[in-house]
Amino acid sequence: MLVGVFKLIQPACFISRMDEEAGCAISAVMMRGNSMHYPEPISKLIDSFMKLPGIGPKTASRLAFFVLDMKEDVVLDFAKALVNAKRNLTYCSVCGHITDQDPCYICEDQRRDRSLVCVVQDSKDVIAMEKMREYNGLYHVLHGSISPMEGIGPEDINIPGLLKRLQDETVQEVILATNPNIEGEATAMYISRLLKPSGIRVTRIAHGLPVGGDLEYADEVTLSKAIEGRREI
């Protein structure tokens, strides 16, 4: 069924991607024309901001001039924070969560219920779940979802790491908490079928979460109800 849905939406998505790429190309050309009026340091700063997701030429320009108006010590602290995060953060070798120690503090915590593993798409989802303060198991971060239209297959996300972890006999249940959209559902279905022969209980969080939404934006009560209402798949 999901394959059919993927095929159905593929032409529309392809057109959407073409429009988006064309828009980005036009914006880039316009930006290059405008940047000729700026000193080189400002142009480079604007170009750097445009590398961030969702930041277009106008927003990048506003951010660049905002930074120029900041006090020098604040700018230096900001730059140090960026470099420090990039140099000192890594991914946990066990669960894949972003961390400044390896294994991460969640995997190291012996008070956690090691019979439960909650599978999420991104580290931001782990943080959202932790804010709920009701889930006491472990996590596994996939760093993405299966998306044939974007050329992302099961081997491109952290599924092999999950299979390796599940060789540990202490794991009794895997909770699939991927986002409630087409890619998230496809990923959950794939993992569910993969784990069926193992005998491990596989559940899916309830759809108290809005279809098409992202886990990180859900409030604590919604997440709590979703965990309580999880179902076996």
Image: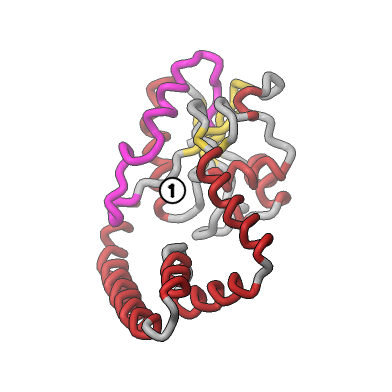
Determine the residue positioned at 71% across, 49% down: 220
Quadrant hosting residue 100: top right
Q: Where in the figure is residue 44, as x and y percent of width and height?
A: 42, 69
User: Where does the magenta region start and end?
Assistant: 147-174
Residue at 59% x, 21% y is 115
Q: Is residue 147 above or below residue 230?
A: below
Residue 87 can be seen in this image: yes
* Residue farthest toward the top in the current orientation of the protein: 169
Seen in the picture, residue 92 relative to 221 is either above or below; the reply is above
Amino acid type at mark 1: Glu
Q: Position of residue 190 (x, y in %)?
A: 37, 39
Q: Nearer the viewer, residue 184 or 153?
A: 153
SS at mark 1 in the image:
helix
Residue behind mark 1: 185
From the viewer's perspective, is residue 215 above or below residue 111? below
**Residue at the image point whose x is 68% and y is 30% from the top:** 136
Q: Is residue 232 visible?
A: no
